[in-house]
Amino acid sequence: MATKSTTAEATRASAEPGTLTLVCVLAWALPGAAHIWLGRRQKGIVFLVVLSLMFGIGLVLEGRIFPFELSEPLVALAAIADMGMGIPWLLTRMMGAGAGLVTAATFEYGNTFLIVAGLLNFLVMLDAFDIAMGRK
Amino acid sequence: VISHFAYLALFALLVSIVFAVLMRDDPRQQLRTAGVLFAGFLATAFVLSWLMYPLPL
């Protein structure tokens, strides 16, 4: 018990604001990258593979990367969720992919995969932050 | 093109894996938790499907 709390205190003491920011940016940019950097290799690799797969499946299923339209709150929320995927989301937008095909039978499935992949990566970011803070 | 159920199962499987890895540290426990979550997702889908069955489309 004493050892565990000492380790947590030591990690917390080393968790400087700059390091924490780097962890969060890394976790956002590439799913699982922060976990790998923090020494949780197995978790990081699983997040990288599974979340990238979800994002890829979403695109294959003709899902849409939603634009930021503040006039339509639900579209704006979906855009924020999509943004959670970091670099894959950025690359997709830059390449002009992810337009979505609203007439496709799988359109809503694709959207679900894309949105949930982004939201799950936000959770992964929080987990990486907790690890960096020494809470886990 | 695969069936709607297959998409549901695939989605449930991937989400279950992420949640299990987030919640547990030991690989064996992660596998068990992922299995339980996946089964829960599928069971919920079946129950909801049957509850909605009488509703007109």
Image (cartoon, rainbow, N blue to C red):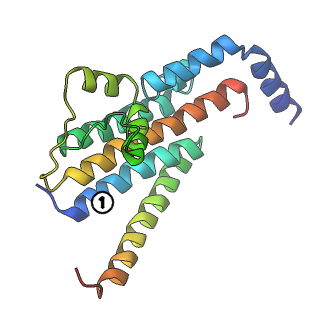
Q: Amino acid at mark 1?
A: Leu
Quadrant in the picture for residue A85: top left
Which quadrant holds residue A19?
top right
Q: Is residue B13 above or below residue A37?
A: below
Residue shown at the point (25%, 57%) measured from the top left = B7
Residue drawn where x is 38% and y is 76% of the image: B48
Query: Which of the two residues, A36 or B31, is positioned nearer the viewer here?
Result: A36
Q: Where B2 falls versus B49 (above or below)?
A: above
Q: Position of residue A104 (x, y in %)?
A: 13, 52
Horizontal side of A36 relative to A97 (left or right) equals right
Q: Is residue B56 above or below residue A69?
A: below
Residue A127 at x, y percent in the picture? 60, 35
Q: Is residue A36 visible?
A: no
Q: Which quadrant: the N terminus of chain A?
A: top right
- Give the residue pinned by disc 1: B8
Residue with the most extreme bottom position: B54
